[in-house]
Amino acid sequence: MRFLFFATGLLLVFILSYLVSNDKKNIRYRAILSMLAVQIILTFILLNTKAGILIISFISKMFNKLIELGIDGVNFVFGGLENKGSSTFFLNVLLPIIFISILIGILNYLKILPLIIKYVGMALSKLNGMGKLENYIALSSAVLGQSEVFLTTKKQIGLVSKKRLYTLCTSAMSAVSIAIVGSYMTMLEPKYVVIAIMLNILSALIVANIVNPYEVTDEEDLLIVEEDHKMSFFQMIGESVMDGLKVAVIVAAMLIGFIALINLIDYLFTIIFHISFQTILGYIFAPIAFLMGIPWDEAVKAGSIMATKLVTNEFVAMLNFKDIAGTLSEKTVGIVSVFLVSFANFSSIGIITGSVKALDTKQGDVVAKFGMKLLYGSTLASMLSATIMGLFL
């Protein structure tokens, strides 16, 4: 049965992508099948082999330890504000992002992350036949996040075509930032977070290959240009601290606003229509959830969480999902968890548009014009990753 729903999920993603494709005749099916095969093999290895289980266990323990160390710093500053035995989301989940941001800054400063991204990106380029810049952004977005990644390519952004810009932005919106992965792992099972990050890299490129196919010549395939100015080590530490704090505060502010807004809308719908807004969203998304492999009797609950993520953000959806995950089957938990691990939501359109516009006004206007199509593509990428996860549950 799982193979049937795997097929229906893939077919759903393909049809929805194909309907909006801007060049249906030039879709490169061989590249798509190659990337899909790699996703299936990778997921199998991570879930069903000793080596894969060890990798996931190591990554999970590493982030748990990082969160613990981050909380030590938080407790030193805010320990007196927290009641013993209680858990404060902002203090225990968001503020440790600052510490992880510092570690990412150090790895970038020592050229460790750029080196890994460069050579893995080159290998991916051989696999899918896409440009080095596309593969660089796909990988870098999974580490740096959807807005920060464009800072590393600001000399190239103004030179790429509209088609290439769409693919770059789809990858950015389909990714997450490593700095907040530890926070995700406090709300979702770590193995699903790790697998989702890896799957989303290729899922975004697969969907982009259908929605937005094109060829890149060697002359067009721009290389990454490193900045001449290099900060000192402690200057980098200071900037990393501020970057981490900004992320924590922004996420906290968005949670306050979006959760309150959803509660208000739910309250009004309950008074007027005697049904909550999230339940309505659940019924709308239930058929999609079902075709992705979620049992029908759980499709409305799952669809509601998926829709919540789309209209608000992944943190709001994860918090809601955490409350009901215990009532759902393992298959549903796995599929929904993987779907939630991305930046594909309405607010991200503004974030990515603003990030690109800050570097190149003209290209920022281009991104704004295909903003809804960008959200559409990145959501399909999340659906593809979740469907693949369902094959192994």
Image (spheres, helix red, strand yellow):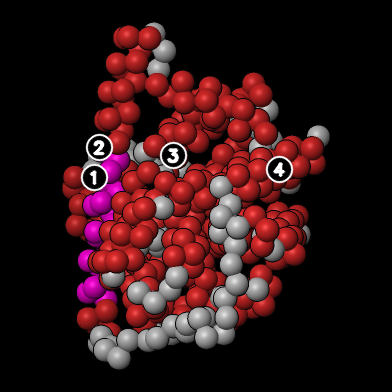
Q: Mark 1 touching mark 3, by CB under 8 A?
A: no
Please name the amino acid that badge 1 sits on. Answer: Ala
Rendered residue at 24%/82% (across/down): 234
Q: Which residue is mark 3?
A: 309
How far separated are the C-alphas under marks 2 and 3?
14 Å
Q: Is residue 245 magenta?
A: yes
Rendered residue at 37%/69% (across/down): 150
User: Which of the 4 image quarters holds residue 130?
Assistant: bottom right
Q: Is residue 202 left or right of residue 375?
A: right
Q: Which residue is mark 2?
A: 257
* Secondary structure character of the magenta stretch overall: helix
2 or 3: tag closer to the N-terminus: 2
Closer to us: 295 or 223: 223
How far separated are the C-alphas under marks 4 and 1?
38 Å
Foreground label between 3 and 4: 4
Foreground label between 2 and 4: 4
How far separated are the C-alphas under marks 1 and 3?
16 Å
Closer to us: 189 or 149: 149
Please name the amino acid that badge 4 sits on. Answer: Leu
Dot 3: element: helix
- Magenta span covers which residues? 237-257
Foreground label between 4 and 1: 4
Mark 3, Cα crowd under 10 Å, few <14 / some 14-19 / many 20+, is many
Dot 2: element: helix
Closer to us: 346 or 81: 346
User: Which of the 4 image quarters holds residue 335?
Assistant: top right
Please name the amino acid that badge 2 sits on. Answer: Gly
Closer to us: 129 or 127: 129
4 or 1: tag closer to the N-terminus: 4
Q: Which residue is mark 1?
A: 253
Foreground label between 1 and 3: 3
Q: Which residue is mark 4?
A: 11
